[in-house]
Image (cartoon, rainbow, N blue to C red):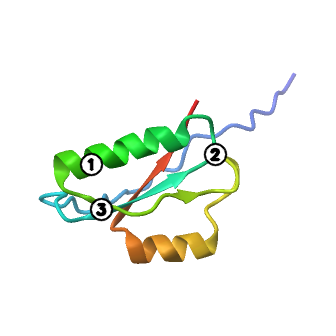
Amino acid sequence: MKLFDPTSAPAPREVTLAPRPASLRGLRVGLVENTKFNSASLLAKIGDRLRDRHGMIVAPMTTKRSPSHEVEEAQIKTLRKQADLVVSGIGD
């Protein structure tokens, strides 16, 4: 009996990490809330800590339509203007 195995190994690829800043002070962080339970409060606490401990500027929180939806193009454009980096939060 012959069996067909549809699985395959992942294709190897080189990954280049973004350069890390020497300091977070003065950088702007965007927060993307996905509407899951506790997501907004978790992100708010993360934003507070980044501001208090590292001197970051916290942009207004962005909310996705639902956890399964992508961030809308208009929201991405706004995030690009308001943030140097983005934290996407989950809840539960």
Q: Is residue 61 visible?
A: yes
In primary-sequence order, the first of circles 2 and 1 is 2
Distance between the alpha carbons at the discs numbered 1 and 3: 19 Å
**Depth check, front residue: 75 or 18:** 75
Q: Which residue was labeled with disc 3?
A: 18
Which element carries disc 1, helix, strand or loop? helix
**Residue 2 x/y as whole percent:** 84, 27
Quarter of the image with the C terminus is top right
Q: Amino acid at mark 1?
A: Leu
Q: In the image, is residue 45 above or below residue 51?
A: above
**Depth check, front residue: 83 or 15:** 83
What's the mark number on residue 27? none
**Location of residue 7 (image quadrant):** top right
**Residue 40 x/y as whole percent:** 52, 44
Q: Residue reaching furthest top?
A: 1
Q: Nearer the viewer, mark 1 or mark 3?
A: 1
Q: Residues within 10 Å of mark 3 (few under 14, many from 20)?
A: few
Q: Which residue was labeled with disc 1?
A: 50
Contact (CB < 8 A) between labels 3 and 2? no
Q: Which residue was labeled with disc 2?
A: 35
Which element carries disc 2, helix, strand or loop? loop
Q: Amino acid at mark 2?
A: Thr
In primary-sequence order, the first of circles 3 and 2 is 3
**Depth check, front residue: 51 or 13:** 51
Quarter of the image with the N terminus is top right
Q: Amino acid at mark 3?
A: Ala
Q: Residue at x 75, y 38 (%)?
A: 6
**Depth check, front residue: 4 or 51:** 51
